[in-house]
Amino acid sequence: MLSGATRVTDEMLTEAAVALSHYVDPGRLEQGGVYPPIQKIRSASKQVAIAVIKAAQQAGLNRTDMGEDIDAFVENHMWRPVYLPIRKVN
């Protein structure tokens, strides 16, 4: 976890769920979907991470120096898929 917290609190889980809920529209919920569409996964993941980090900070569990801009810190630490081109092997 980016915050360096050694445990996860109920508040951190709650904040993660609340952040995720902003990316799931009512129509999707009615169909039984609890996760955002794949096109929103990256932005949803980022907002969940930010919410959890803030909850960790409030609980005094944050052990990582992130500077003032948590948004940029999370963005800079997110995995970015890089795929090599496929080439035919004889």
Image: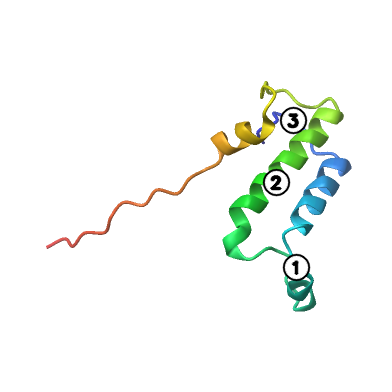
Residue projecting furthest to the left: 90
Counting residues from the N terminus, which is met first, the one under dot 1 or under dot 3?
A: 3
Q: CA distance from mark 1 to mark 3?
A: 31 Å
Contact, mark 3 vs mark 2 (Cβ under 8 Å):
no
Mark 1 surroundings: few (<14), some (14-19) or many (≥20) residues within 10 A: some
Closer to the eye: label 1 or 3: 1
Name which residue type carries label 2.
Answer: Gln
Q: Are marks 1 and 3 in contact (CB under 8 Å)?
A: no
Provide the residue designation for mark 3.
5
Which of disc 2 and disc 1 is earlier in sequence? 1
Where 79 falls versus 38 (above or below)? above
Q: Is residue 8 above or below residue 90?
A: above
Q: Earlier along the polypeptide chain: callout 3 or callout 2?
A: 3
Q: Secondary structure at mark 3?
A: loop
Where does the C terminus fall, quadrant-wise?
Answer: bottom left
Report the residue marked by disc 1.
25
Task: For marks 1 and 2, give the CA distance.
Answer: 16 Å
Q: Residue at x 87, y 42 (%)?
A: 11
Identify the disc placed on residue 47. Answer: 2
Q: Image height check: is 73 above or below 26?
A: above
In this rendering, the count of numbered labels is 3
Q: Quadrant of residue 77?
A: top right
Q: Residue at x 21, y 59 (%)?
A: 87
Residue at horizontal 76%, vertical 75%? 27
Q: To which quarter of the image does residue 54 belong?
A: top right
Q: Position of residue 86 (x, y in %)?
A: 26, 59
Residue 82 image offset from top left, x and y in percent? 39, 48
Label 3 sits on what residue type? Ala
Q: Would you say 31 lies left or right of 80 here?
A: right
Left or right: residue 69 compared with residue 55 = left
Badge number at residue 52: none
